[in-house]
Image (spheres, helix red, strand yellow):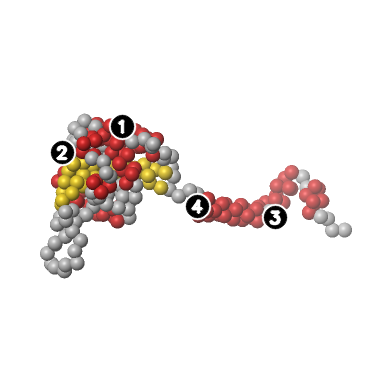
Amino acid sequence: MKKSEKQKWMELNQEQRKQYFLDYYLFPVSVIIIILAIVCFLGWHFFLKPDEENLLYAAVVDDSLDQEKQEQAVLDMQDILGADGKYKQIHIDDSFYLKDGALDKIQVYLHSQQIDVLILDQDVFEEFAGYGYFRSLDELTGEDLAEKYDTDYVYAAGYRDTDEISFEDHETGQGATEAYGLSLEGKNRFTDMTGGYLEHPVFAVAVDAPNPENALKFLDYLMNGEGGEE
């Protein structure tokens, strides 16, 4: 009479059972475990894992921030905007140095609609405004931000869209002069955390900022610590 697998197993001692398992079951069990792991991995990353989202991305150009204060500002903005720091993120990025080719990086980020805020020196601000990188603050909000924060609007000529075909540039810096920026000079959270390399720091909102409302809440935070959700 042919013995069943269960009977064979019961007649084996401990060492024999171990060898029996290694000989007959280790490979198929390992294959099953690997397949299950792959299925779980793909299921998590393609179906179950929440999408990562930047609730605020602020680019600081040509300045170095105090690391401890920068990290605290990120934590504060996480509280203000309800970010968990993992899937909903806040970035205050001071890695943009023009002498190291940061203009190309900024252009890529702007094109992919990743940047909400740029903080930069006034002369660079005026150059970037001419490229059409910023959104008019008057267009963004009905509030008089210069009056609200007791500071100054910073005006610059924007980019002029035209169908004119010419070897000369009739577009860059040929648009209307508007309030594309707000001065951050004086005592505020930004100047408290900055390395002081920007002589005339200006706050500006990127033209295609994905989170313009959050950009204004960040401005509130920088200027007076407000900006929590209503």
- Label 1 sits on residue: 225
Residue 7's x, y, as percent?
82, 51
Label disc, if present, on residue 24 of the rendered structure: 3
User: Image quadrant for the C terminus?
Assistant: top left
State the CA–CA distance, disc 4 to disc 3: 34 Å
Q: Amino acid at mark 3?
A: Tyr
What element does badge 3 sit on? helix
Displayed quadrant of residue 143: top left
- Label 2 sits on residue: 199
Counting residues from the start of the chain, the first of labels 1 and 2 encountered is: 2
Left or right of 202: which side holds 42? right
Instruction: Identify which residue is drawn at 72% across, 45% down.
Output: 15
Mark 1 nearby-residue class (10 Å; few <14, some 14–19, many ≥20): some
Counting residues from the start of the chain, the first of labels 1 and 3 encountered is: 3
- Label 4 sits on residue: 45
Mark 4 nearby-residue class (10 Å; few <14, some 14–19, many ≥20): few
Residue 132's x, y, as percent?
21, 54
What element does badge 1 sit on? loop
State the CA–CA distance, disc 4 to disc 1: 37 Å
